Amino acid sequence: MTLGRDQLVVIGGVAAGLAAAMEARRASADLHVTVLERTGDISYGACGLPYVVAGLIPSLQQLVVHTPEYFRERHGIEIRLNSEALEVLPAKSIVRVAENGEEREMGYGALVIATGAAAVCPPLPGHELEGVFVVRHMRDGRRMLRFIEEARPQSAVVVGAGYIGLEMAEAFTARGLRTTLVEASDKLMSALGGGARDRLADELRSNGVEVLFGERVVGFEGGAGRVARVLTESGGALVADIVSIGVGVRPEVGLARAAGLEVGEAGAIVTDERQRTSAGGVYAAGDCCEVLHRVSGRRVWNPLGQPAVRQGWVAGANAARGDGSTRARYAGVVGTNVCKVFRLEAARTGLSLEEARAAGFDAAETETETLSRAGYYPGAALIQTCLVTDRAGRLLGAQMVGREGVAQRVDVYAAALHAGLKADDIERLDLAYAPPFAPTIDPIIRAAHAARKREL
Ligand SMILES: Cc1cc2nc3c(=O)[nH]c(=O)nc-3n(C[C@H](O)[C@H](O)[C@H](O)COP(=O)(O)OP(=O)(O)OC[C@H]3O[C@@H](n4cnc5c(N)ncnc54)[C@H](O)[C@@H]3O)c2cc1C
């Protein structure tokens, strides 16, 4: 058994795990840092997978940020690929590891769990047919691309219209496949309803994607072990040479649960603002964790890349230096998310009206439409904004859709939510203006103005 009080062990070698390892190295040059990763891949941007499938990015290799050698040689961080943590024993500060067909024990002074999330694949009849995929890790991308290369599919069905489903629908279309997107609810990106949903659906349809709302997939059929049709509850049979299932992810908490770590209502590991778990010396970060939602004040599960890295930094700094000697704290999320759907940008931050009411707010929403640039300047495009506010005018959430100027503008609302601003605070912000970038009154100000007037 490897023993070591000066040993930091990190489980998981993607966004959160490697951020923790690097931050720990920055905090302490002497610490032995070992990262265990059960697959053969580390340090890659899973977010780029749809763009490789689309052919926009030529190869999966381009998603790789750093190699194991980089971590070893430049930073003295030991990367162990194909090395799975089987069990964590916090009382003994030991991790049981399987590597190359052998099991061994590793002692740790501090442990960071960054086991991430797994894509949900509902056990519907036929889900095991060749050609039915989830998209989560590098190996999923590899399998899908190999299948596309070999089977040359002509038609695709995407199940689920979350942001990954939307990106996959665009990716298949870009590859020349006839694509159908099937969504059980009447929403896109799990929150966009009304005008924003209709505009996105129109964008998909005008680019050749068939969009079916309120249709539940009940199974898959095929011949010779390969998928050929997707069956829906209403009796439909959609032709599909390839299927991408994007109905959500679940946190990978098996290891943590078995170790007796507290798992919260949202189903992920409970951590405090220093990313400490309920077990001494054990930290957690990324998609396997719950976080504080700064608007609702609740612990939520918010599996996204940027929060994962930042939690990794906090976990790494605290794990390296011990709890007391660092100021590293994670401030929580406001739930910001952006997605490109063909030529549209769709973004949300904070709570939707439904979420706000469910969280107990007396909330209302205000919709506005404004141009992205001065009306006379070429290329001005319509931005639809929906602001959710409470009776006192406090901003609770924002959703935006438009051809340009959405992705960056939503960040202003995210900052406003972070700071707990009201609509009239936002209205008073001094924002940048020049005709190629904004109308004289920016869409952010215009929407806040409309929301404030609604209160009067
Ligand atoms: C197609 C796609 C598009 C995305 N787009 C965006 C986007 O636009 N914006 C955004 O913010 N986020 C996006 N994301 C989400 C983002 O990729 C994740 O939030 C991020 O990867 C989370 O990082 P993580 O390190 O917490 O977990 P993961 O990336 O899930 O990594 C966890 C790692 O832990 C390993 N592991 C698990 N258990 C063990 C064990 N017992 N022993 C050893 N290793 C183990 C796993 O093999 C895995 O490699 C996207 C994801 C996908 C799949």
Image: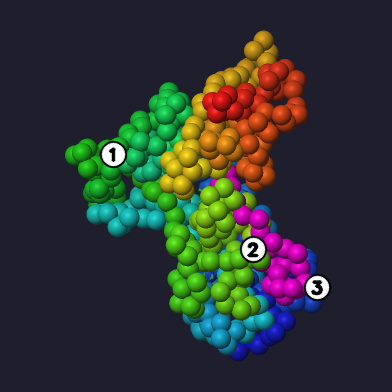
What residue sits 24% from the left and 42% below the top?
232
Which secondary structure, mark 2?
A: loop
Q: Does residue 347 appear in this view?
A: no
* Residue placed furthest toward the top: 376
- How far is mark 3 from mark 1, CA to CA? 55 Å
Give SS at disc 1. loop
Q: Which residue is mark 2?
A: 273
Q: Within the magenta stretch, is there residue 418?
A: no
Using residue 295 as the reference point, say whether residue 136 is left or right of it: left
Look at the picture and state if 97 lies above or below 184: below
Residue at image location 53% in from the left, 50% down from the top? 296
Q: In the rendered view, does 326 fall on the left or right side of 37?
A: right
Q: Disc 3 to disc 2, how far (Cα)?
A: 24 Å
Q: CA distance from mark 1 to mark 2?
A: 41 Å
With respect to residue 390, does 290 lie above or below? below
Tag 3 secondary structure: loop
Disc 3 marks which residue? 29
Query: What span is in magenta?
Result: 312-336
